[in-house]
């Protein structure tokens, strides 16, 4: 390696720019004077750089594709969030529309029927989703002085969540409808038959007793029944779906996996009357949940 002295390097640095400018003007003059030669030089230069461009084209295309995919994924996330919010609104409107449709049919059948008074309710946040003596329960934080009492019905914006089993000065525990200790009398909307919805400690409760010849229909709605006075009639619980073992399970309409706020309703003073059971119905007993679903233990 040749080492140049500092004055020589400084002189070369000063001459580099004028030399480059002169070379550029020289190339321009040659191109004007001999167009054929300029074309041949450009072609030769293009031939020399073409393999380099070809080698770089594929990685650059992949980088552009990855960038486009990232932009598309970001757009899809935003679109999914918007669609989830719209679906949530549609579910609420569907539940409200079905309830209004059922109420309208009742009005047509009983023109003199007067609706019961609206129940009082307390809104409370969910602060814990485990603990206590139950496998499926949530703990609520209530602000004193509150009017929460044992037995009140907990609901979210979709439907029934469970019932209050314990009440303290600043807390209340709600037994969810999926707990194995939960037993709720229900009515099947399409068939009109009565049944018992039992929790399994899993995500889906099951249906047990129903009138003979009126088995639950897949897809029909399950509503609370006032047959024993524990619940008012007509509160939405979920929809019926049969599993692989042909066991009728209930998909809860309430979002039990993402509870943040619930409302506790007191139906004691609303004058809800229990409807009469259909005459001449023979109840058909189903096996206990332990034989219906091996996981319900």
Image (spheres, grey):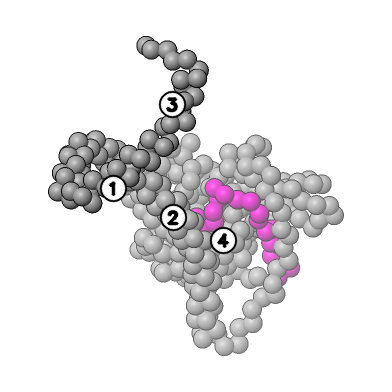
Q: Residues within 10 Å of mark 4 (few under 14, many from 20)?
A: many
Q: Along the polypeptide, which appears first: circle 3 or circle 2?
A: 3
Q: Position of residue 292 (x, y in %)?
A: 40, 44
Residue placed under numbered mark 3 in the picture: 12
Residue 258 is inside the magenta segment: yes
Q: CA distance from mark 3 to mark 2?
A: 55 Å
User: Which residue has dot 2 on it?
Assistant: 75
The Cα–Cα distance between marks 3 and 1, rounded to whole angstroms, is: 24 Å
Residue 297 place in picture, x, y as percent: 48, 36
Crowd tier of the residue under label 3, counting other residues whose Cα lies within 10 Å: few below 14, some 14–19, many 20 or above: few
Image point (67%, 48%), residue name: 126
Measure the C-alpha gap from mark 4 to mark 1.
82 Å
Circle 4 residue? 159
Residue 180 in the figure: left or right of residue 143: left
List the residue tagged with mark 1.
Answer: 28
Residue 140: assigned label: none
Instruction: First in sequence, mark 3 or 4: give its number.
Output: 3
Instruction: Name the residue rendered at 33%, 50% in the picture.
Output: 246
Q: Is residue 139 above or below residue 284?
A: above
Among the 4 quarters of the image, the one containing residue 282: bottom left
Q: How far is mark 3 from mark 4, CA to CA?
A: 85 Å
- Vertical position of residue 19 compared to residue 254: above or below: above
The residue range painted magenta reads 251-271
């Amino acid at each position: 390696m040749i080492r140049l002295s500092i004055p020589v390097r400084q002189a070369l640095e000063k001459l580099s720019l004028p030399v480059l400018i002169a070379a550029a003007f020289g190339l321009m003059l040659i191109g004007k004077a001999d167009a054929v030669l300029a074309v041949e030089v450009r072609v030769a230069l293009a031939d020399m750089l073409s393999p380099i461009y070809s080698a770089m084209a594929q990685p650059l295309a992949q980088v552009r594709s990855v960038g486009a995919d990232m932009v598309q994924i970001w757009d899809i996330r935003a679109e999914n969030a918007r669609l989830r919010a719209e679906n949530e609104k549609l579910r609420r409107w569907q539940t409200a529309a079905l309830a209004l449709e059922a109420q309208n049919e009742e009005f047509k059948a009983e023109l003199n029927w007067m609706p019961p008074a609206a129940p009082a309710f307390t809104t409370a946040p969910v602060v814990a989703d485990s603990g206590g003596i139950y496998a499926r329960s949530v703990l609520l934080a209530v602000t004193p002085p509150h009017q929460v009492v044992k037995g009140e019905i907990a609901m979210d914006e979709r439907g029934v969540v469970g019932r209050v089993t314990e009440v303290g000065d600043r807390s209340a525990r709600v037994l969810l409808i999926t707990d194995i200790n939960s037993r709720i009398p229900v009515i099947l909307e399409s068939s009109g038959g009565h049944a018992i919805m039992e929790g399994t400690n899993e995500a889906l409760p099951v249906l047990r007793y129903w009138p003979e010849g009126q088995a639950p229909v897949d897809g029909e709605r399950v509503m609370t029944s006032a047959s024993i006075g524990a619940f008012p009639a007509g509160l939405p619980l979920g929809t019926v779906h049969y599993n692989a073992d042909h066991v009728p399970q209930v998909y809860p309409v309430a979002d039990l996996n993402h509870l943040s706020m619930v409302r506790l309703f007191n139906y004691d003073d609303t004058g809800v009357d229990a409807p009469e059971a259909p005459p001449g119905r023979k109840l058909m007993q189903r096996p206990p949940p332990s034989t219906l679903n091996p996981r319900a233990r």
